[in-house]
Image: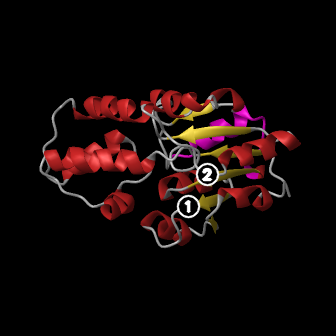
Amino acid sequence: MRPQAVLFDCDGVIVDSEGPTFDLLIADLAAHGLRLTRQQLETDYIGGTIEIIAGKIRAAGTALPETWVQDFHQRMYALLAQGTPLVSGILTVFDALDAVGIPYAVGSNGTARKMEISLGQHGLIPRFRAVLSGQAIGRPKPDPAIYLQAARACGADPARCVVIEDSPSGAGAALAAGIPCLGYAGHGPDTPPARQLAALGVPLFARMDDLPGLLGL
């Protein structure tokens, strides 16, 4: 059955921003004495807000400046503004949804400014019924509020929507909202996020070009 609406995460699902952001984060934390691998970040931090990441790092004993969150956001915005590629095949998905009149929205733990930069540079924002930030509404994932609000913005019953996610926190938000979820595993099923999604019982797919068929379009 076709969904009434499709609700997308942003980073790693629409825009291929996680790699550059993680590289920036690894370098930044190393400068403060904490050396983390990409695998450690993907295992412990993917899908979280910068504030949540900072809290975990400080709790583990690494001192960060009081203004670190705000300073890192500015460095990240500058990096993304230089050019943030789209996930391969995502425009085909949007075109397929438009062709059959199915609305779609974005629900991200990123800031509104981050999405203005990463989505705005591709002219995508007008295509969505809503572009929602968990930080802006004060209830980041895995709280289900962002996807419930996105479903309302699309005029859809949450149970008849589908969420497209790449992180366990986002999938947890979808499942807590009673919304079916598909997990995008563009880097393969053996990455930490893909394994965590599978552990939640979320079906995985590896090519965005396959998504229209999975949605019954």
Query: In the image, 114: left or right of 101?
Result: left
Mark 1 vs mark 2: in front: 2
Outermost front residue:
82
Task: Reply above or below: 14 against 116.
Answer: below
* Circle 1 crowding by C-alpha within 10 Å: few under 14, some 14–19, many from 20: some
**Amino acid type of the residue that numbered disc 1 sits on in the rendered structure:** Gly
Magenta segment includes 158: yes
Secondary structure beneath label 1:
loop
Query: Where residue 13 sits: x, y (%)?
Result: 57, 49
Q: Earlier in the sequence, mark 1 or mark 2?
A: 2
Task: Reply above or below: 69 against 54.
Answer: above
Q: Tell me the magenta residue range.
A: 143-159
Task: Reply above or below: 177 against 125.
Answer: below
Q: Which residue is at a point 37% across and 35% down the rendered structure image?
A: 79
Which image quarter is the C terminus in? Answer: bottom right
Query: Where residue 158 sits: x, y (%)?
Result: 72, 46
Q: How many marks?
A: 2
Quarter occupied by residue 98: top right
Q: Are marks 1 and 2 in contact (CB under 8 Å)?
A: yes
Instruction: List the residue tagged with mark 1.
Output: 186
Quarter occupied by residue 82: top left
Secondary structure beneath label 2:
loop
**Amino acid type of the residue that numbered disc 2 sits on in the rendered structure:** Ser
Query: Where residue 163 sits: x, y (%)?
Result: 65, 51
Instruction: List the residue tagged with mark 2.
Output: 88
Magenta segment includes 164: no
Closest to the observer, 23 or 129: 23
Query: Where residue 27 sits: x, y (%)?
Result: 23, 48
Task: Reply above or below: 59 against 193.
Answer: above
Q: Which residue is at a point 66% across and 47% down the rendered structure image?
A: 90
Closest to the observer, 159 or 21: 21
Q: Which residue is at a point 53% across and 40% down the rendered structure image?
A: 108
